[in-house]
Amino acid sequence: AEKNLTLMLDWFVNPGHGPIIIAKERGYFEQAGLQVKIEEPADPSTPAKLVAAGKVDLAVSYQPNLTMDVSAGLPLIRASTLVATPLNTLLVLDNGKNDSLADLKGKKIGISISGNEEATLSTMLGQEGVKFSDVNIINVGWALSSSLASGKVDAIWGGFRNFEINQLALEGYKAKAFYPEEHGVPSYDELIFVANANTYNKEDIEAFNKAIQQATTYIVNHPSEAWEQFVAYAPDTLNNELNKRAWNDSLSRFALRPAAVDFKRYDDYAHFLYDHQIINTLPKAKNYVPTFD
Amino acid sequence: MAQYHSVSTRLSKKERITYSVLRLMISAAVILGLWQLVVVAFQMPSFILPSPMAVLDRLGTRYDVLLKHTWVTAQEILLGLGLGLTMGLMFALMMLMFQPLKRWLLPILIASQAIPVFAIAPVMMLWLGYGIASKVVIAAIIIFFPVTTCCYDGLRNTPIGYLDLAKTMGASKWQLLRHIQFPAALPTLASGIRVAVVIAPIGAVVGEWVGSSEGLGYLMLQANARMIIDEMFAALFILAVLSITLYFTTDIVLKKAIPWENK
Amino acid sequence: MAQYHSVSTRLSKKERITYSVLRLMISAAVILGLWQLVVVAFQMPSFILPSPMAVLDRLGTRYDVLLKHTWVTAQEILLGLGLGLTMGLMFALMMLMFQPLKRWLLPILIASQAIPVFAIAPVMMLWLGYGIASKVVIAAIIIFFPVTTCCYDGLRNTPIGYLDLAKTMGASKWQLLRHIQFPAALPTLASGIRVAVVIAPIGAVVGEWVGSSEGLGYLMLQANARMIIDEMFAALFILAVLSITLYFTTDIVLKKAIPWENK
Amino acid sequence: MCAKAIIGIKIRHGGLQYRGSSASTLAGVNMTIPAKQWTVLLGRSGSGKTTLLRYLAGLLDDQVEWQGEIEVSGNDVSAENIVLHDHIAYMAQQDLLLPWLNVLDNVCLSSRFANVAPNKEQDKQRALSLLEQVGLADNAYMTPAQLSGGMRQRVALARTLMQDKPLVLMDEPFSALDAVTRHKLQTLSVSLLKDKTVVLITHDPQEAVRLADQLYVLQGAPAQAQQLDVPESSPPRKLDAECAALQQAILDQLEKDYE
Amino acid sequence: MCAKAIIGIKIRHGGLQYRGSSASTLAGVNMTIPAKQWTVLLGRSGSGKTTLLRYLAGLLDDQVEWQGEIEVSGNDVSAENIVLHDHIAYMAQQDLLLPWLNVLDNVCLSSRFANVAPNKEQDKQRALSLLEQVGLADNAYMTPAQLSGGMRQRVALARTLMQDKPLVLMDEPFSALDAVTRHKLQTLSVSLLKDKTVVLITHDPQEAVRLADQLYVLQGAPAQAQQLDVPESSPPRKLDAECAALQQAILDQLEKDYE
Ligand SMILES: Nc1ncnc2c1ncn2[C@@H]1O[C@H](COP(=O)(O)OP(=O)(O)OP(=O)(O)O)[C@@H](O)[C@H]1O
Ligand SMILES: Nc1ncnc2c1ncn2[C@@H]1O[C@H](COP(=O)(O)OP(=O)(O)OP(=O)(O)O)[C@@H](O)[C@H]1O
Ligand SMILES: [Mg+2]
Ligand SMILES: [Mg+2]
């Protein structure tokens, strides 16, 4: 008998969700005995809440946010990893005006609020002697690329390296990226799956992880067939040049072993947040990062 | 001192319709022209404001996708209107029947208007899920305030003479409501419906933004995030056309249904 | 048949104010009670709908931060109201002065209402920057339609007798406008202002959501992202209180300024 | 059916006070409203004319305190047990035609509220013949908005006749009409209501003089009813010297009570 | 100042047609409006009374075609070159008091539109004395909403007097009032407007009989003016047999023109 699982993405379907879509399209979920229903929210903070409330079984979230959520008392655990590296970057236009982070002193940085930007940006800028209070932080919502391209801000934080860089390139702007993990921020998993700490079913998650791993393997082995199948999921919105480029840049980012656990990576990042007073209690990774096969 | 109709009302009906269609088309042309002018004059990059040509082009090439999503949104709007009107009418009836209730409910009404639907959307999602129900409810909530106030004002302000007359004819409370108060409230109700029809689409689109996998709002967000701004504007254009069509259709229907509206 | 006022109007003014403040407070208590009930009855997790107690607590501990952002949003609302009212009045005057213009402008007006501001808000940010200007403009646009229609209706429907009288007294077109048409339009204008005051805060907050670095909307986003939901609701609560206060203040001011409003 | 009932009323020491009001509106009112006659009530604005009429129509039962006696006499054996409210038709200054019904449906309005299921076809025939009597046979399927003020008030008259109640209460029914239309409608009403007991409120001394079998002026605060003599001739009267004199007398008397 | 000007008007073969209308409203109207007298216009609804008055007041210049002659005669040497519109005050059925001004400011309204800078203090004194003449000295600082219908129309009268124009055009100024108030206001108007040339429209034959120095009935389509004889006595007349007879005659004549 198949089990029904509801999976809520962090946002609308995009190439970062490749393994999920491929697992669904190629029937890996069914082979694992799962019937997975995919939902797409517009606000990335909703899915985790709904998992915590028991309304959906699994959700795509981010490692920093999981730590913040757990610290705030939400009953969540990490189930597996989707993308095992950071994707966030600090982007500037490659026009010679901002060649180093030090040049951003007194400038405007557009962000899409995710909760940990203060910690990350102050660390990155601090390495080059710029204080957080020396820059002007502006929430630009989802208009990251266009605010940068139109010159309304000098840098953007919150864009993904596989996505925004390509987007800007397509509009004819060359972007320069500063990677947080190269500027003093602990490395972390950008996209992870979370489940409810009290009600999660170990077998289901293991089956799910297996399907995701199969899909990732397929994608890595057959990138262009996988692209065709990915696009077939929602041709109305997925089939375009931007997604194609983003797809290619995502290939190397998918976690090859979704279930693999690295407590230290979680504890280091939690410390980082705690030190910057983003969270008031320090959760222990072993309490919210259970191991699955 | 009677106010006499202007010459235009003495035109035949057919002529009048032709004229207003013509006028609508010319207005549209003027708007498009201005838009193109802005694009050219300010050298707008296409990710800020695409040219109308690009948008029309998009409408042509993607009409099948756009139509599919339009149909979804249209359903949400219509169901939302149905629900909102029913709720508003019932609420107004309650306030009418239990007079003292009114003073307590008014602040709730205003608060319901003051809290952005966006903010309570997660709660709504939790209760209603990601299907059509949540969009319908959001559209209904957004029109609830104007509909309720209009219904209530209409029902409450029945000319006292009508009530006296019907009472001396032996009408019961229920007959008064059905034969006198309700029909007498229709003109005021109609203005509530006109407002509702203009804002209900906003509710549906906001609902789609909060979470959905189809509809014009979904399409717009998608297109926006992908910087395919001409597609976003195409969806926006359809939405505007949808709203305006809905408004004028409703207007015509209401005028036919309530011919005594403007004395 | 004259309609006689109910007993309540025969109370002294002071009593009436006391009563309505009392009623407001009881309503507030009822709303809070209902809220608590929902939380308990549906076992709402606190990260979706926190209990009123938690929110009030947050209000107490974070009042300084909240106040700072409230002040920003309040400024945006007030400036937006000012701009929107001015624009609406000018637009209405134009339609009045150049009658034929009206038929061309009406579709623009309805379209301006039909296009959700949300959708063009991001574009607006790119034009006007992320400062206060963009929020003011969004708030102004959102109130533009009701204000303009009310202004126009008011200016146009001056009783013809007033105009006749002033004309026989030798009034010029400009004097007619200033001494007759404008004051005669005030009551209708007032209902436009009442609506505007209720929806302007939504415009400001939407503007903040789309792009800003301060204000209640910004605070809400940030609290939401950090999962400090009680702070988000505290901001929401302040927003609702702000709207309601604005509404009742405006109502009182308008009643004082236009005592002849209700005959 | 009470079509054959004929009703007269005697009010003795009538007094009336609105609840929540500190002063009485009427006190010590003595009036005789004889069956099948026109009793006309005059009085300055606010003297309580409408109040008295609405009380008789049962529209004020929950808003006022009433003192005194109302004696209903009729040709019916059970006259004493009659519930007055059930035998009344009401006509006001406004025609009160419902704009969403056509003329015929407006005339038939009362059958919608009847306790017994109405005989539609029969009602319709009767309504049409009444419309013919008021001279509007051709307008039965028009909406009220298409009629002039005088025509509308004639429809209201037909509606009142349709109710076929022995007692007709009229609150300034002609005062919104111009002089000529008013004059014609007065004549018409007298002829069509000749079998009814009519109580008519008016502000117009000339109207009172033309139509009254009995003439009362409500005066003072709280108001009392004072009876005036009317010419011998039977209404509707032509204007002659006697009428003119009475009219002038009424004007002079009323002016005293004014401001 | 034209306070001392006295104006009479003769209309010869006057004809009038609304632009865009297919039929004339007035045709072949001959009327004499003598200086310092009351000329009363009667006629069925829609016969064109208001149209004629508004034309004389210059309110229809861009909406109608006028044919015929209007001769203005005055005591002034330059009477022929007079622009009629500048010498007119207008009173309508509604009192037209502006609700946002108090009584005194309403009376002084015309000075807001004056070409010369008004002398505020002097205007105020004059307005107050006029208010005293109409019996409202105590109400100068009230708002119109606080006054009764009769009081409001008296304020309108004071406002008209304040304009101090030789020709006063009145369109049913008393018809919204009850009979007694109307009677009192007629008397008051006659005494206060004794130096003015007055054109009065009315629907009420009794009013016409009481006030007319000249009596015209507009009749037919397009309407013509027909003159009727009035009693010898000077207005305001007491109601007597002669008046009653004339009134009945007018009613009979007007009824012919009705429906
Ligand atoms: N519901 C009410 N509550 C308290 N007082 C009332 C009420 N209705 C009427 N009155 C008072 O009763 C008095 C008589 O009013 P009513 O309407 O009967 O006068 P009327 O003679 O019909 O006047 P009009 O000639 O203006 O129609 C007035 O002083 C009025 O203020
Ligand atoms: N602006 C207009 N355009 C066309 N026809 C008009 C206009 N104004 C009035 N009329 C017509 O002119 C005729 C005379 O109207 P007017 O208002 O002068 O009548 P009246 O004698 O004053 O009627 P009442 O007694 O009802 O006041 C009417 O048939 C009316 O329809
Ligand atoms: Mg009355
Ligand atoms: Mg007229």
Image: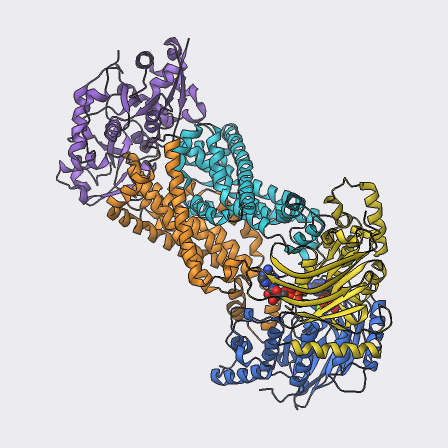
Chain colours: A purple, B cyan, C orange, D yellow, E blue
Name the residue at 56% across, 52% down. C104
Name the residue at 45% across, 52% down. C196
Q: Residue furthest right?
A: D233
For residue A91, side relative to residue E82 (left or right): left
Q: Quadrant of residue D68?
A: bottom right
Q: Viewer-proximal residue, D56 or A132?
A: D56
Q: Position of residue E246 (x, y in %)?
A: 83, 78
Note whether C146 is above or below C169 in the view shown. Answer: above
For residue C108, side relative to residue A66 (left or right): right
Q: Position of residue B202 (x, y in %)?
A: 47, 40
Q: Position of residue B3 (x, y in %)?
A: 66, 62
Q: Is residue B115 visible?
A: no
Q: Viewer-proximal residue, A255 or C147?
A: C147
Considering the image in quadrants, where does the C terminus of chain E appear? bottom right
Name the residue at 80% across, 64% down. D38
Mark count: 0
Q: Viewer-proximal residue, B247 or D163?
A: D163
Q: Is residue B258 visible?
A: yes
Q: Position of residue A252 (x, y in %)?
A: 26, 19
Note whether A80 is above or below B36 in the view shown. Answer: above
Considering the image in quadrants, where does the N terminus of chain E appear? bottom right
Q: Viewer-proximal residue, E51 or B222?
A: E51
Report the image quarter containing ligand 4: bottom right
For residue E192, side relative to residue A133 (left or right): right
